[in-house]
């Protein structure tokens, strides 16, 4: 199977349809904040021949591979190595004041999961790294070996929604005192042994939630999403549209809250006429979050947890 065939972009047609009304004018700019293998980006370039694409990723490998894939589009595609909350600086550097479309496809890419030596996958033994950008920050092994037990419990609970966090962390702390963690298989074994039988019967691989939590911590993912979504909304021109695909409830909650706040009037109660400056600046394009169809999930398991939310910018900020 070719690498493109394995990395099918999630809810692709829905994302394109959602952004379409904003991307038909000549000179429209669409930003793909999570380039990855370039699946969504390529489809954007194909579907909207008038549009220019700016695509970001923090992972140098993704930029390299997607760069090859998008070569045929020449100057219509500008690829930038950046963390997505740096979007305002990136646009300023490129001299782009406002954009017409923004797409986020959050989380880890199939490509990153497939590269066993990066340590994202609990199903393969590999060094516990999990950094999306291996040139910066600390690895998952360092987190496991050096964080205070209380911090590990907090991370597993908050980012992994792991009910057995305390039990798992006790086992980790016991084991790391014998020998620091370096590889994923040992962590998987320690988690499996720490959990009571009943907890192992539900929810797939028992290491899944701990791995998710470590990955989110290592890459400071939620802080980046929290800063990036409002920054993207701020970068939208009136009529511009944003679509965000999340894969776990913490990310989705942030997106939901930012969109809901933008779509709500900030007027104090009781005003007979709501002045312009209090009017909502976003219109929601999705009622709740949209889910992939059963057919898509049957064809692409990675799509299963996806939730898509969209919004349109309907008003300038009034200062
Ligand atoms: C799910 S993949 C995107 C897949 C892509 N839509 C496609 O069709 O191939 C997410 C990508 O976002 C990148 N990423 C994750 N967090 C990031 C951040 N804070 N800043 C920039 N890129 C990030 C990852 O490196 C990964 O390549």
Image (spheres, rainbow, N blue to C red):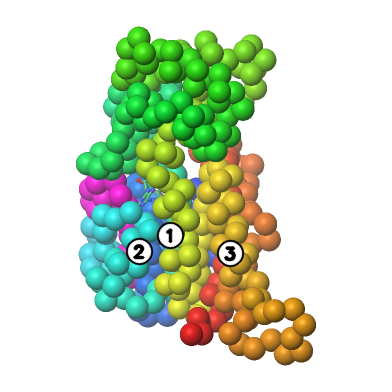
216 part of magenta stretch: no
Identify residue for label 1. 228
Q: Give the CA separation, mark 3 to mark 1.
A: 12 Å
Task: Where is residue 317? Give x, y as percent.
Answer: 50, 81
Q: Residue at x 67, y 15 (%)?
A: 198
Do labels 1 and 2 touch, CB within 8 Å? Answer: yes
Task: Where is residue 206? Give x, y as percent.
Answer: 54, 21
The mark nearer the N terminus, 1 or 2, is: 2
Identify residue for label 2. 87
Do labels 3 and 1 touch, CB within 8 Å? Answer: no
The mark nearer the N terminus, 2 or 3, is: 2
> Which stretch did the figure color magenta?
52-68
Q: Residue at x 61, y 17 (%)?
A: 200
Task: Where is residue 114? Give x, y as percent.
Answer: 36, 31
**Front position in the image: 202 or 10:** 202
Q: Is residue 13 visible?
A: no
**Front position in the image: 112 or 193:** 193
Identify residue for label 3. 259
């Amino acid at each position: 199977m070719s690498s493109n065939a394995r990395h099918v972009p999630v809810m692709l047609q829905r994302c394109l349809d959602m952004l379409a009304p904003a991307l038909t004018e000549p000179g429209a700019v669409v930003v793909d904040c999570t380039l990855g293998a370039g699946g969504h980006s390529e489809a954007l370039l194909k579907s909207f021949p008038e549009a220019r694409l700016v695509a970001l990723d923090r992972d140098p490998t993704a930029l390299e591979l997607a760069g090859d894939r998008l070569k045929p589009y020449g100057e219509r595609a500008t690829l930038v190595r950046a963390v997505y909350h740096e979007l305002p600086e990136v646009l300023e550097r490129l001299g782009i004041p406002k954009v017409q479309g923004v797409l986020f496809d959050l989380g880890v890419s199939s490509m990153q999961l497939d590269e066993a030596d990066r340590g994202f996958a609990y199903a393969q033994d590999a060094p516990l790294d999990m950094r999306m950008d291996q040139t910066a920050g600390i690895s998952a092994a360092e987190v496991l070996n050096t964080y205070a037990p209380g911090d590990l419990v907090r991370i597993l609970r908050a980012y992994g929604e792991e009910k057995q966090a305390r039990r798992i962390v006790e086992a980790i702390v016991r084991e790391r005192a014998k020998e620091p963690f370096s590889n994923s298989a040992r962590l998987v074994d320690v988690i499996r042994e720490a959990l009571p039988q009943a907890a192992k019967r539900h929810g797939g691989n028992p290491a899944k939630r701990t791995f998710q939590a470590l990955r989110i911590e290592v890459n400071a993912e939620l802080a980046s999403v929290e800063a990036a979504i409002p920054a993207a909304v701020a970068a939208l021109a009136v009529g511009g549209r944003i679509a965000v695909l999340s894969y776990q409830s913490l990310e989705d909650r942030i997106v939901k809250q930012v969109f809901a706040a933008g779509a709500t009037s900030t007027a104090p109660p009781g005003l007979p006429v709501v002045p312009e400056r209090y009017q909502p600046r976003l219109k929601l394009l999705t009622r709740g979050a949209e889910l992939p169809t059963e057919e898509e999930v049957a064809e692409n398991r990675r799509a299963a947890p996806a939730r898509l939310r969209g919004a349109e910018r309907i008003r300038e900020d009034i200062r």
